[in-house]
Image (tube, rainbow, N blue to C red):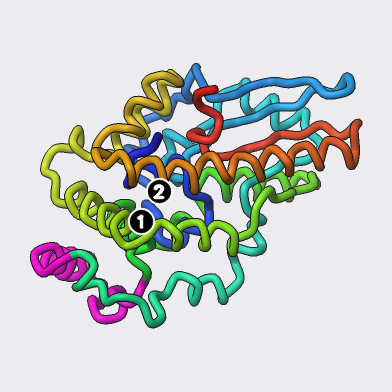
């Protein structure tokens, strides 16, 4: 089960990196230490070793600084499997798929008070409210919650880094899903969940204490590598059980079926090819 805002980073794929968190600034003297407990799993198929790695879709250096175990797994793989092909994310048509063409106006979706907060965010972020307000609410939630600098995520988010480095090393890069599939999944959530996403993104943005920010909480728990705690924090803040069940079915259960089928297909096509599979960490939690 998944908190609607945290899902943007733990579940939602790299298509949303166009509106993602800018890389966090760190002191030049500060050395980022990789986590000792990555969500990294090894499995065997016909005598070949493969790895499954759980990510969160962020360019934060604490996330993109990988452990020796993860780097060794990548080094030993013949191909890297991601949720979406990085080439597809560069298609200019992706932006149009994020626009709320003919949909309910944002002001009606989130209400007058929240719209005023949205306008305040636009002013502080130097974003044109009229234009940004034309985006789909779930895209806005990502944009609000995860920062103002869109460019950073296009080159520095973990998924993008994994794909770019694999290609630079001459490795094959494969995809389990298409952007169309992911956009349709988010569109199907319905207005109630879309509203929850935007409101929680605004709540996080205007929170004074970093400890109250769900994205910061998500990063800290992710780095601890504790599956149970990761599931618990994912559930936090989602009180509507009916909406939660729909959210989980569409973004986790249904997509997991397709991802497993994609991995199985890759294994069958070239049984001797070693895979490094990287998907959102929420996909590999639980049973």
The region drawn magenta spans 111-135
Q: Residues within 10 Å of mark 1 (few under 14, many from 20)?
A: many
Residue name at image x 65 percent, y 45 percent: 82
Q: Is residue 103 above or below residue 198?
A: below
Magenta part, dominant SS: helix
Q: Give the labeled residue for mark 2.
A: 8
Indicate the position of residue 62 as horizontal and vertical percent values. Answer: 42, 33
Q: Residues within 10 Å of mark 2 (few under 14, many from 20)?
A: many
Residue 283's disc is none
Quadrant location of the N terminus in the rendered image: top left
- Image-quadrant location for residue 91: bottom right
Indicate the position of residue 90 as horizontal and vertical percent values. Answer: 60, 67
Residue 142's disc is 1
Residue name at image x 26 percent, y 53 percent: 196
Residue 75 in magenta? no
Of callouts 1 and 2, the N-terminal one: 2
Q: How many marks do you count on the picture?
A: 2
Q: Is residue 282 above or below residue 180?
A: above
Is residue 148 in view?
no
Labels 1 & 2 near each other (Cβ < 8 A): yes
Residue name at image x 64 percent, y 40 percent: 257
Indicate the position of residue 272 as horizontal and vertical percent values. Answer: 91, 31
Indicate the position of residue 223 as horizontal and vertical percent values. Answer: 42, 26
Quadrant location of the C terminus in the rendered image: top right
Secondary structure found at label 1: helix
Secondary structure found at label 2: helix
- Image-quadrant location for residue 85: bottom right
């Amino acid at each position: 089960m998944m908190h609607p805002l945290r899902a943007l980073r733990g579940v939602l794929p790299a298509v949303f990196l166009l509106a993602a968190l800018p890389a966090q600034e760190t002191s030049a003297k500060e050395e980022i230490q990789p986590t000792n407990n990555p969500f990294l799993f090894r499995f065997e198929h016909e005598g070949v070793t493969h790895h499954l790695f759980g990510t969160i879709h962020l360019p934060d250096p604490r996330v993109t600084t990988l452990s020796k175990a993860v780097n060794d797994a990548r080094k030993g793989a013949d191909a890297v499997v991601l949720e979406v092909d990085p080439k597809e994310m560069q298609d200019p048509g992706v932006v149009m798929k994020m626009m709320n063409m003919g949909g309910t106006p944002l002001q009606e979706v989130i209400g007058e008070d929240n719209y005023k907060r949205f306008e305040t965010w636009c002013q502080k972020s130097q974003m044109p409210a009229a234009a940004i307000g034309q985006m789909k609410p779930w895209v806005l939630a990502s944009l609000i919650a995860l920062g103002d600098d869109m460019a950073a995520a296009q080159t520095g988010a973990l998924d993008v880094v994994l794909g770019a480095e694999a290609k630079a090393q001459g490795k094959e890069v494969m995809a389990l899903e298409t952007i169309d599939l992911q956009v349709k999944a988010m569109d199907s959530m319905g207005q109630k969940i879309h509203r929850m996403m935007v409101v929680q993104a605004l709540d996080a943005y205007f929170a004074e204490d970093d400890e109250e920010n769900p994205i910061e909480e998500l990063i800290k728990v992710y780095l601890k590598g504790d599956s149970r705690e990761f599931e618990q924090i994912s559930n936090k803040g989602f009180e509507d059980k009916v909406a939660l069940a729909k959210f989980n079915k569409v973004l986790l259960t249904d997509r997991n079926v397709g991802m497993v089928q994609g991995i199985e297909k890759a294994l069958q096509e070239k049984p001797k090819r070693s895979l490094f599979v990287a998907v959102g960490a929420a996909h590999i939690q639980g049973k």
